[in-house]
Image: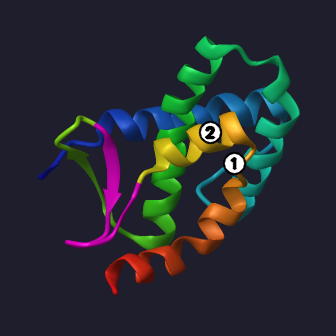
Amino acid sequence: MYQVAESSELLEDAELVIEVLSEKEDVQLDYSADSISWLDAYIDEHRAKLDAGDKSVLREKLGAFLGESIRHNFGGRWVKAGDGSWMIRFDEERQASPFDIIGEHLEHHASLSQAIEHLPDLMVQRHN
C-alpha cells in the first residue's frame, strides 16, 4: 500500500544538494545525467573517508537528489510505502527506490550512472 506524499521536504533536500555541492565543488549541478555522473565520481572519490554517520546523512540527502533526477528524466511521483520508505512511483507496477540506489553506491560501489541508464529497462521488466 502506497500513499501519495507531499514531496516538498524531499525537493528541499535535493535543492540543498545542488546548492551546497555546486558552491563547494565549483560545479553546476542540475537533475541531468551529467550531474548524476559527476555525483557518481564524487562519491567514489570520497567514499573511503565516510563513516556510518556520514553515509546515513548522504543516503538521505543524495537519495532525495537522485529521486528528483529520476522524476525530472522519467516522470513519476514521490510516494511513501507502508514501511515508511520513499519511492518514485511510475504506475501501479513500476517504481524506483532512489535511497536504496544511493545506499548501494555508498556501501558497494554500485554505479549511479548505470542504475539510471538501466532504469527504463528495469521499469519495463517489472511491468511485464
Q: Is residue 117 left or right of residue 15?
A: right
Q: Judge whether 32 appears above or below 65 on screen.
A: below
On the image, the x and y values in percent for residue 58 come to 59, 27
Q: In the current view of this chain or complex, which residue is farthest to the bottom?
A: 128
Q: Which mark is residue 79?
A: none
Q: N-terminal of the two: label 2 or label 1?
A: 2
The kind of residue on which mark 1 rests is Leu
Q: Secondary structure at mark 2?
A: helix
| Residues packed near mark 1 inside 10 Å, few (<14), some (14 to 19) or many (20 plus) | many
Q: Which mark is residue 29?
A: 1
Q: Are marks 2 and 1 in contact (CB under 8 Å)?
A: yes
Q: Is residue 56 left or right of residue 51?
A: left
Q: Coloring scheme of the render? A: rainbow
On the image, the x and y values in percent for residue 125 come to 43, 81
On the image, the x and y values in percent for residue 8 come to 30, 38
Residue 46 occupies which quadrant of the picture? Answer: top right
Judging depth in this view, the residue of 90 and 28 nearest the camera is 90
Can residue 28 be seen here? The reply is no
The residue that appears at 74% across and 61% down in the rendered structure is 34
Q: Judge whether 115 appears above or below 22 on screen.
A: below
Judging depth in this view, the residue of 8 and 42 nearest the camera is 42
Q: Is residue 107 a member of the stretch shown in magenta?
A: no
Q: Is residue 92 a member of the stretch shown in magenta?
A: yes
The residue that appears at 48% across and 41% down in the rendered structure is 99
| Magenta-drawn segment | 85-96
Residue beneath disc 2: 18
Q: Is residue 4 left or right of residue 27?
A: left
